[in-house]
Amino acid sequence: MKINKRFILEITLIILSGLAIFFITQHNERWYQQPLAQVMTVKNSQPETTEDEFKNKDQQTHQKLTFKMLNGKHRGQVYPGTNTFSYSGGNDQQFFKGQKVFVNLEKNQNKTYVTISNYKRDTYLLMLIWALIAMTYLVARFKGMLALLSVGLNFIIFLLCVQIDVHYNIDHIFGLFSMSALVFLALSLALVIGINKQWLVTFSSIFIGTSAAMIIGIIALALTNNQGIHYEALDFATQSPKQLFMSATVIGLLGAVMDAATDIVSTLFELKRTDSNISRKQLFKSGQAVGKSIMGPLINVLLLIFFTEALAMAVLFFRTGNTLNYTFEWTMSLGVVQALISGIGITLVIPSASALSA
């Protein structure tokens, strides 16, 4: 009975905290220094067909909007504004009545107009974070909170590495992010598993699988002279695109290999705790069996993540009349290479994790 009462209390507190976050973020306009407005009315024009110098066709629609200011000295006042959105939606978006947006106020011929600078997304972002924390606590309790703590710390470390790269303009950023990946690995395992023999086995097997997969990937790219690989297609690359691509690959690879290795090692350690007489050979075979059962789903997860990342750009390319080969080459080829290297890492970590655990 006590457990049920505690559970009901926890659920009640979680729901109340979610409602509080939603209410606060819906009425926190005064927290922002940048002008914030709500779209009051929307009038769309007829779509117009456009075509660029590469014969890519699109449609543009002009919007006449009115905005009610929500903060600052202009709070409560209503101003007109305009917006243009395209059918492809590559660099713009359509706005609707009731949406809250960050704006800039501009004067033209003694009249004030509003231009939209960004969409207010804090409610959605914080509600997603709340849902993640709530579900993690309900399912995994203290262990889940430690996992989220490791995510937060790794995020801070990642931002520090990015700031170091930007500040010092490092030429070989692959080395920087490879070292950060080792820190991610050690810290995450220490918080979730603890510093013990299982931590050492898991760390070693992940290091072996990740290193071997990266070496194989680099050799394969070198032997094929990077044919068909357009590093310059990497979005917003402000320094060596190849270095950025390899840095992103090693971090993604680490995540995939870590997932497989922790499953295998934790399973074999639990088998040993349950049956102290189990032989090394039996442990190794059990590890192989676990690895074979999770290998397929993990590789499919990688492909699904890749599809998610490539979807928006692929749709944009197809909507603007590009061919399948051209779209694949410039929006999907890099993701396929990353997925293949990660798949190799998952395959290689199975024997290494099984052998080290045994």
Image (cartoon, rainbow, N blue to C red):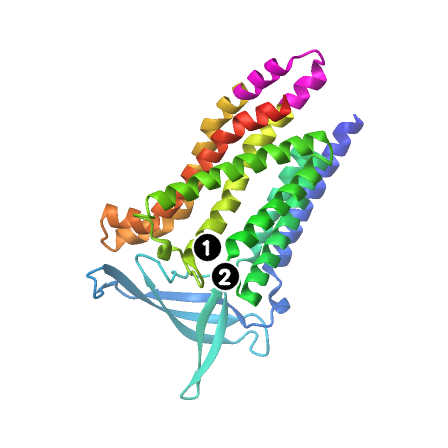
Q: Callout 2: 10 Å neighbours few (<14), some, many (20+)?
A: few
Q: Does the CB distance between marks 1 and 2 fall below 8 Å? A: yes
Cα distance, mark 1 to mark 2?
Answer: 8 Å
Q: Is residue 120 something that shows in the picture?
A: yes
Boundaries of the magenta span: 268-288
Residue situated in front as seen by the camera: 334 or 20: 334
Asked whether residue 112 is drawn in magenta, I would say no
Q: Is residue 306 something that shows in the picture?
A: no
Residue at horizontal 50 percent and vertical 26 percent from the top: 294
Give the answer, above or below, for where 75 lies relative to 290: below
Residue at horizontal 77 percent and vertical 28 percent from the top: 3
Residue situated in front as seen by the camera: 264 or 45: 264
Residue 171 location (% of width, % of height): 50, 61
Residue situated in front as seen by the camera: 279 or 136: 279
Residue furthest out toward the right:
2
Numbered label attached to residue 243: 1
Residue 138 location (% of width, % of height): 67, 35
Residue 286 location (% of width, % of height): 57, 17
Q: Callout 1: 10 Å neighbours few (<14), some, many (20+)?
A: some
Q: Amino acid at mark 1?
A: Gln
Asked whether residue 287 is drawn in magenta, I would say yes
Residue situated in front as seen by the camera: 13 or 291: 291
**Occupied quadrant, residue 197:** top right
> Which sits earlier in the primary sequence, circle 1 or circle 2?
2
Instruction: Quadrant for the N terminus, please.
Output: top right
Tell me the SS state at disc 2: loop
Give the answer, above or below, for where 113 lies relative to 243: below
- Residue designated by label 2: 171
Q: Amino acid at mark 2?
A: Asp
**Occupied quadrant, residue 90:** bottom left
